[in-house]
Image: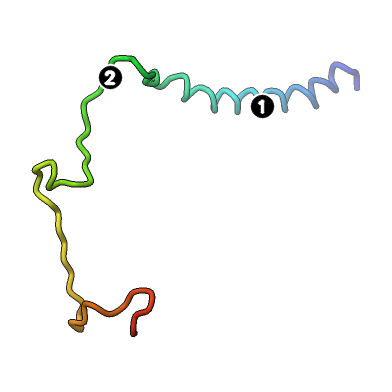
Amino acid sequence: MSVVQTVLAFVVPPVVIYVVVALLTIAPKTAKRPRYRTGEKWGYEPVLWTANPEGAHLPAHVEHIEPADGAGTTGGARGHW
């Protein structure tokens, strides 16, 4: 087996695999939209999120669940089980 055949058999396939994996890793990042940088104009629709819907005059989502046995004050770190 010559030196050229040895290089083609043992060096080229791992290099090709590394290049393919690198391209598959880098390609999605380069195809995305550009990132927002401070000071640039914001070109996206606003997303409304608030931790205080009453303060934003939005209807509050309140879900009050009573315990099945009616004992709503027991429990916690030192509760009586």
Residue at x-position 34% and y-position 15%: 39
Observer-nearest of 49 and 76? 76
Q: Is residue 49 above or below residue 76?
A: above
Category of crowding for the residue at label 2, using alpha-carbon neighbours closer than 10 angstroms: few (below 14), some (14–19), many (at least 20): few
Q: How many marks?
A: 2
Give the left or right position of residue 56, taking residue 9 as reference.
left
Residue at x-position 14% and y-position 58%: 62
Observer-nearest of 36 and 73? 73
Residue at x-position 79% and y-position 20%: 8
Query: What amino acid type should be assigned to the residue bearing mark 1?
Result: Tyr
**How far across and how far down the image is residue 11, in percent?**
78, 24
Query: What amino acid type should be assigned to the residue bearing mark 2?
Result: Trp
**How far across and how far down the image is residue 23, in percent?**
57, 23
Figure colour scheme: rainbow
Q: Secondary structure at mark 1?
A: helix
Give the left or right position of residue 69, taking residue 34 as reference.
left
Give the left or right position of residue 37, taking residue 4 as reference.
left
Observer-nearest of 28 and 39? 39
Q: Secondary structure at mark 2?
A: loop
Q: Is residue 61 above or below residue 12?
A: below
Disc on res. 42: 2
Q: Quadrant of the N terminus?
A: top right
Give the left or right position of residue 19, taking residue 3 as reference.
left
Residue at x-position 37% and y-position 78%: 78
**How far across and how far down the image is residue 13, in percent?**
72, 26
Which of the 4 quarters of the picture holds residue 32? top left
Mark positioned earlier in the residue sequence (1 or 2): 1
Residue carrying label 1: 18
Q: Is residue 15 above or below residue 67?
A: above
Q: Quadrant of the C terminus?
A: bottom left
